[in-house]
Image (cartoon, helix red, strand yellow):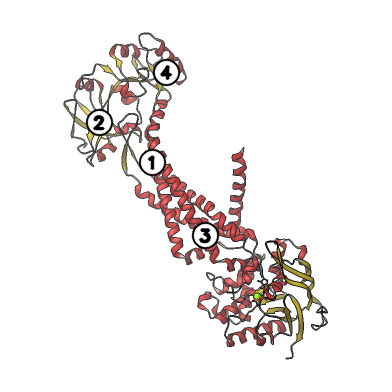
């Protein structure tokens, strides 16, 4: 309700401003030229705005990259079975006997006799990045069906791994960030050498931070006797509740079920501290940029006091002056915004990673500066112009007409 | 003191009628009277020089006549309108239609060229671009500056700037021109040129002019001189030309 009370006048003001750009008498070229005339202050203010908008767009793409990494992975009709209270795959374990019972559950989708599910093991191993830092990388062992359950994953070089012969595939993204990950190379894990036989992409999802191999090979190498999780497709997404209950209540199982989507949503929180920090920095910088725009515009208004008085004397009305100076601020900030959005494209395609605070392993993602994000950045700069320009424009519109007559 | 009447100023229909005009400024609770009991009629086609010592209220009176300030008391009718009855927007439209302004410091917009400066007041009127162009060129040729129309103010001499300002004042074809020290910033030669131009506007185009000036030589170009002394009309002198 209060939001509406604030938003309504704001929207009305915005609508009027748009109308004013076309129909009010002070032409915008007058403002553009005034901006051009005071180049130093215009460029320094627009530069500050550009910087803030550039950072804003990069932070947006960061937040978006992280949520793509986790969210695109999830499906509603696929469930992850974990040990109770495990929360994450890495903490979970399911013994072979329970896994056997689980795999014949009647609610699982089937293809002929084959249930659509993959018993998996998740481990982490320390790898050295290209920059010398050590970081944990998730290693996932899966059954052949595991690839079917991840249709977003596709081979871009080489082929998928085969069971029983110590082969792995690595994410395309990881190849740039870690040395020696080329197809044809080898990685050492669990006292064995593994051949890298392929590189894959998975639509930017968190799978692109994992090395994949055959589950039996991985268990053997790591001398593990139990699985971590089961990833399973259900016959019907609506029966997930039923499946959850039966797996929980079955005395032989006593396991926990989460939908894949819910699981990855939980993981997205890994990005929260970064997003919070990014937002904080953006908010502080935005405050500074708005202040700078306001300052510049106040100075411009003070310098043109007589000019404004003269315009009023010639018959221009208060609202003509208000719109004119408000637009001058918006043009100033918008120019900065365009430059800033352009600057942000330099971040485009940079691959980076961050440590997930929950799973303590590396999550890779790429900055993708889309036209949509750039448009958001420019829109953001226009809002800064609106906010920073309002008070100076208001003051300009209140300058007494008699100022025009003052000598000096 | 007798009121200055239209008869005094050469007869004819009054275009400016001031009745018992008062203007005060307030400093906290203290009233500072600037104009007191001004009665004045100025006929259509008159050319009046408003003189008086500094601080006597000349600019204040001119502002009231031109509708850029409002009196504290009394009534005024200018170009057929009782200005007290107009709200701010109406007054703005009235100024645009009826008054041309000539300022001491020209008050040209530095980022607009001569043509655009002259065009400014026309932007408030429902005219086509070509009609505006026709009028701007006409006004510029009247002040003899067609060849300078693409120049910016900084590329013009002070005298030329003031002539551009005069073109801007007449481009809307107003009945009344008000000028506050129009030659105050000019050297003798340029001042003389501007004064002759204003005299032509008065004699040939029939513009009513009210000009504030300190300079007796400038005042000599007007048909009548009015003297203000401490906010009161002191005496009116007919100029013998
Ligand atoms: N906005 C204002 N607030 C308070 N006092 C004012 C204001 N404007 C003018 N005054 C006072 O009113 C008086 C008349 O001022 P005005 O500018 O009309 O004088 P003037 O005759 O034009 O003087 P000058 O020849 O110096 O231009 C002065 O004493 C001035 O200080
Ligand atoms: Mg004065």
Quadrant placement of the N terminus of chain B: bottom right
Residue topped by disc 1: A62
Q: Nearer the viewer, mark 3 or mark 2?
A: 3
Q: Residue at x 61, y 78 (%)?
A: B140
What distance separates the C-alpha of mark 1 from that of mark 3? 33 Å
Between A31 and B173, the one lying in front of the other is: A31
Which of B126 and A224 lies nearest the eye of the viewer? A224
Q: Which residue is mark 2?
A: A169
Nearest to the observer: residue A277 or residue B168: A277
Q: Secondary structure at mark 3?
A: helix
Q: Crowding near pointer 2: few (<14 within 10 Å), some, many (20+)? A: many
Depicted B76 relative to depicted A85: above or below: below
Q: CA distance from mark 3 to mark 2?
A: 58 Å
N-term-proximal mark, 1 vs 4? 1
Task: Evaluate whether residue A72 shows in this view.
Answer: no
Ligand 1 near label 1 (Cβ, under 8 Å)? Answer: no
Give the class, few, some or many, for how many residues have Cα within 10 Å of label 1's Cα (few <14, many ≥20): many
Tell me the crowding category of disc 3: few under 14, some 14 to 19, or many 20 or more residues within 10 angstroms, Cα based.
many
Secondary structure at badge 1 equals helix
Please report whichever mark, 4 or 3, sits nearer to the chain's N-terminal start.
Answer: 4
Instruction: Look at the numbered disc 4 and give the secondary structure of its residue.
Output: loop
Total of numbered circles in the picture? Answer: 4
Residue A235 marker: 4
Mark 2 vs mark 4: in front: 2
Can marks 4 and 3 be said to lie on one chain?
yes
Whether residues under marks 3 and 2 lie with C-beta atoms below 8 angstroms apart, the answer is no
Which residue lies most toward the front here? B30
Q: Which residue is mark 3?
A: A297
């Amino acid at each position: 309700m209060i939001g509406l009370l604030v938003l309504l006048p704001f929207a009305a003001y915005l609508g009027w401003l748009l109308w004013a750009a076309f129909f009010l008498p002070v032409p915008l070229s007058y403002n553009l030229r005034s901006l051009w005339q005071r180049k130093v202050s215009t460029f320094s203010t627009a530069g500050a705005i550009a910087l803030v908008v550039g950072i804003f767009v990069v932070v947006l793409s960061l937040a978006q990259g992280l949520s793509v990494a986790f969210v695109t992975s999830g499906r509603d009709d696929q469930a992850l079975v974990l040990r109770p209270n495990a929360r994450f795959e890495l903490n979970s374990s399911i013994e072979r006997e329970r896994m056997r019972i689980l795999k014949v559950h009647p609610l699982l989708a089937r293809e002929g006799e084959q249930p659509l599910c993959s018993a998996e093991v998740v481990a982490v191993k320390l790898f050295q990045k290209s920059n010398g830092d050590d970081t944990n990388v998730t290693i996932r062992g899966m059954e052949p069906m595991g690839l079917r359950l991840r249709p977003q994953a596709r081979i871009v070089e080489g082929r998928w791994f085969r069971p029983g012969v110590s082969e792995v595939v690595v994410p395309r993204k990881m190849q740039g960030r870690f040395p020696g990950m080329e197809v044809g190379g080898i990685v050492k894990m669990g006292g064995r050498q593994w051949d890298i036989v392929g590189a894959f992409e998975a639509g930017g999802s968190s799978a692109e931070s994992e090395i994949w191999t055959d589950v039996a090979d991985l268990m053997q190498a790591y001398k593990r006797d139990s699985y971590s999780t089961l990833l399973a497709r259900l016959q019907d997404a609506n029966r997930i509740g039923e499946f959850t209950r039966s797996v929980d209540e079955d005395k032989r199982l006593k396991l926990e079920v989460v939908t894949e989507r819910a699981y990855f949503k939980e993981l997205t929180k890994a990005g929260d501290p970064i997003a919070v920090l990014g937002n904080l920095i953006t908010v502080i910088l935005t405050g500074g940029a708005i202040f700078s725009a306001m300052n510049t515009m106040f100075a411009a208004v003070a310098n043109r006091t007589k000019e404004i008085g003269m315009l009023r004397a010639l018959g221009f009305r208060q609202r003509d002056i208000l719109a004119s100076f408000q637009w001058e601020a918006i043009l100033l900030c918008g120019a900065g915004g365009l430059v800033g959005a352009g600057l942000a494209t330099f971040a485009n395609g940079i691959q980076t990673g961050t440590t997930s605070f929950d799973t303590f392993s590396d999550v890779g993602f790429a900055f993708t500066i889309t036209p949509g994000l750039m448009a958001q950045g420019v829109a953001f700069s226009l809002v800064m112009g609106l906010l920073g320009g309002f008070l100076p424009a208001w003051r300009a519109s209140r300058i007494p007409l008699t100022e025009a007559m003052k000598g000096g | 003191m007798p009121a200055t009447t239209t008869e005094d100023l050469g007869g004819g229909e009054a275009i400016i009628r001031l009745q018992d005009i008062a203007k005060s400024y307030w400093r906290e609770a203290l009233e500072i009277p600037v104009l007191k009991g001004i009665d004045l009629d100025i006929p259509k086609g008159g050319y009046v020089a408003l003189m008086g010592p500094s601080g006597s209220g000349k600019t204040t009176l001119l502002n009231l006549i031109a509708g850029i300030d409002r009196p504290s008391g009394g009534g005024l009718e200018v170009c057929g309108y009782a200005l007290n009855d107009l709200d701010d927007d109406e007054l703005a439209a009235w100024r645009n239609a009826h008054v041309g302004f000539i300022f001491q410091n020209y008050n040209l917009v530095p980022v607009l060229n001569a043509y655009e400066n002259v065009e400014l007041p026309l932007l408030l009127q429902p005219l086509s671009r070509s009609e505006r162009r026709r009028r701007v060129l006409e006004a510029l040729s009247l002040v003899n500056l067609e060849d300078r129309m693409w120049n910016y103010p900084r590329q013009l001499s002070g005298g030329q700037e003031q002539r551009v300002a005069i073109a801007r004042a007449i481009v809307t074809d107003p009945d009344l021109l008000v000028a506050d020290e129009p030659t105050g910033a000019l050297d003798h030669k340029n001042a003389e040129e501007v004064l002759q131009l204003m005299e032509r506007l008065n004699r040939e185009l029939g513009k009513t002019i009210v000009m504030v000036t300190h300079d007796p030589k400038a005042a000599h170009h007007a048909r009548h001189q009015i003297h203000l002394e401490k906010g009161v009309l002191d005496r009116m002198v007919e100029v013998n030309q």
